[in-house]
Amino acid sequence: MQDGINSPMSEHIQPQQNNPATHGLFNANHEVSVDNLPITGTMPAWLHGTLLRNGPGKINAGDQQFRHWFDGYAMLHKFAFQNGQVSYAGKYLESQAHQSAKDAGQITYTEFATDPCRSLFGRAMAVFNHTVTDNAKVSIAHFADQFLALTETPIQVEFDAETLKSVGVFNYEEGLVGQMTTAHPHFFDEHMFNIVTRFGAMSYYRAYRVDQDMNSVRMGAIRTGKPSYMHSFGMTKNYVIVTEFPLVVNPLSLLFWLKPFIENFNWEPKRGTPFYVLNRHTGELVGRYECDPFFAFHHVNAYEQGDELILDIDAYPDADIVTQYYLNRLKDPTLQLPHGNMTRFIVPLKGKRVRSELISDACIELPHIDYKHYNTNPDYRYVYGIGLHEAHQQGFYNQLVKIDVQSGHDIIWYEADCYPGEPVFVPSPNRQAEDDGVLLSVVLDAAHETSFLLVLDARTLDELARATLPYPVMFGFHGIYVPEDA
C-alpha cells in the first residue's frame, strides 16, 4: 500500500453480485428480546452467566450510509445462560451520536471514515465546532463493578448490563477534542491501564492508570511528532509497551479536519515500527527499540522472559487491511482480505533491535485468549480467532481458528455459508487444562439469512450446541463473558 488511507478505491468497485456475507454488513439489527432461543444440540448445563457483545448495529442514518465497517452505530447484545437455556436481548447503545442521527434523519457526527460535512463550507465550520463521537461500538470492559462500551475516541460509555441502558460516561482526561485512546485497556492489580494519544504541535502517548473509584492518574508520556494509529498496546507485569506502527498522521491534518479521521493517516514504512517501553510502576521511559515496518490492530499477549519482553501480535506487513474494510469493498464477492498472522516480537531490554518470528501462517483476526488467567503468563498456549478457510479465501471471514503458540499447530471450525464472529473462551468448572472450556461465537448463517450463537468444545472445536436468533446480526467486534457470580 503506497498511498496510505487517503484515497480509498472502494468508491470505484462495482461488484456484479454481493458477497453473501452482506447479510451481516447491511441489514440493520432489530432491538428485540427473546426469552428462550431454540437450541440444537446440548447446551452445557454449567454455563451460568452472560455473554455481552458490541459492534455496529446499522450503517446508515436516513438516506445516508456510512463508508466503513468501523463506522456503524453501536449495538449491545446480551446472551444469558441459565439451566441449559439461552435468552437474548439486543439494544442500540444510547449515545448522543445515535440520538442526533435519529432526530436529524442523517449522519451528524464524524466517525472513523465518514464525515457528515460534505460541503467545503461545512468542513471549514467543523474546524471551529468539532464534536467528538460517543458511538462506542468496538469492545466492552467490566471494571470496578461497571460495564463500559469502548471505542477509540476518549468517551467510554457506561451501561447497565441488565437493561443495556446507558448510565454515564468515563473520560481519562479533560479536553476531548484532540485526543484518542485504544479500544483495549489492560487490567492488572485491580487497576485499568490505557494509552491516550494527545494530538498537538507536539503530540504525546500518555499512559494512564485507573483505580476502583474510577480515578485516573497519568503514569508517563512519550513524545512524538507524527502519532500512530493505535488500536491496542502491550503490557507485562512490569512494563507498558507502545508499538508505533508507521500508519501516522500530521497532527495539523486533524486540527483542520478536512477529511474523515482515518483518511488523514499515511503509511510511511521508512519509519519502521519502534517499540517504546515504559516502567509500569514509575512511568519512566525504559527505552526505544527499533523494528521493521508492520501493522496490527491487536496485541494478543505479552510477558517477560529474563531481559527480554515477548509480545505476540496479530501482524500484517502493511496497513492495507484498514482500506479493505470499506463497505463497498466488503460487498465484493471476489474480495481477498489480507491475512493477519500470529507473530512473536522479542524486545531486548539491554539491546536496540527487535527480533520477530512467525508463530503460524494461519489467517487470524479478532484474536482472543483466556485473558483473566493467562494474560502476561509465559506458559500460555492458545489463541482463538476468526479467519479465512484455505479453500475459500474470497469474501469475508468464514472460519474459526485455534492456534497453539507453542507448536504453531492450528485447528479450525468451518461450515459452508457461515461467517463467525470473535470466539470468546469460557473455562469449565474445575478445569484441568488451559483449553478446558467452551468457545462462544455469533455466526451469520447466510443461506438461511439469520444468525446463531455457536458453542464449541474449546479443545477440539467440535460443536456442542447452537441457539438460533430470529434475525441476522450485523458483524460485530468484541465481547466478554461474565459469570453469574462475578
Image (cartoon, grey):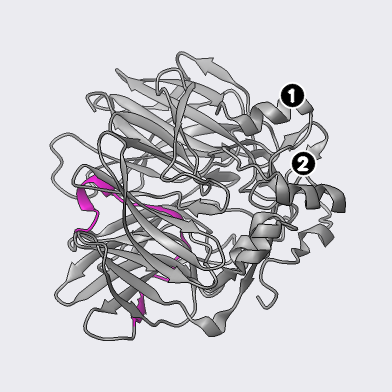
Query: Can you tell which quarter of the image residue 324 is in?
Result: bottom right
- Please give the range of residues in magenta: 354-377
* Amino acid tagged 1: Asp
The mark closer to the camera, 2 or 1, is 1
Q: Residue at x 43, y 46 (%)?
A: 173
> Relative to 14, is 28 on the left or the right?
left
Kindly identify which residue carries mark 2.
65
Q: Residue at x 42, y 57 (%)?
A: 232
Q: Which mark is residue 75?
A: none
Residue at 64 percent across and 71 percent down: it is 266
Residue in front for this viewpoint, 454 or 383? 383
Quarter of the rendering occupied by the N terminus: bottom right
* Left or right of residue 263: residue 294: left
Q: Position of residue 358 (x, y in %)?
A: 38, 75
Front residue of this view, candidates 347 and 436 = 347
The answer to whether residue 312 is magenta is no
Asked whether residue 368 is drawn in magenta, I would say yes
Q: Which residue is mark 1?
A: 103
Percent coordinates x, y for residue 131 in the rendering: 65, 42
Residue 49 sits above or below residue 110 on the image: above
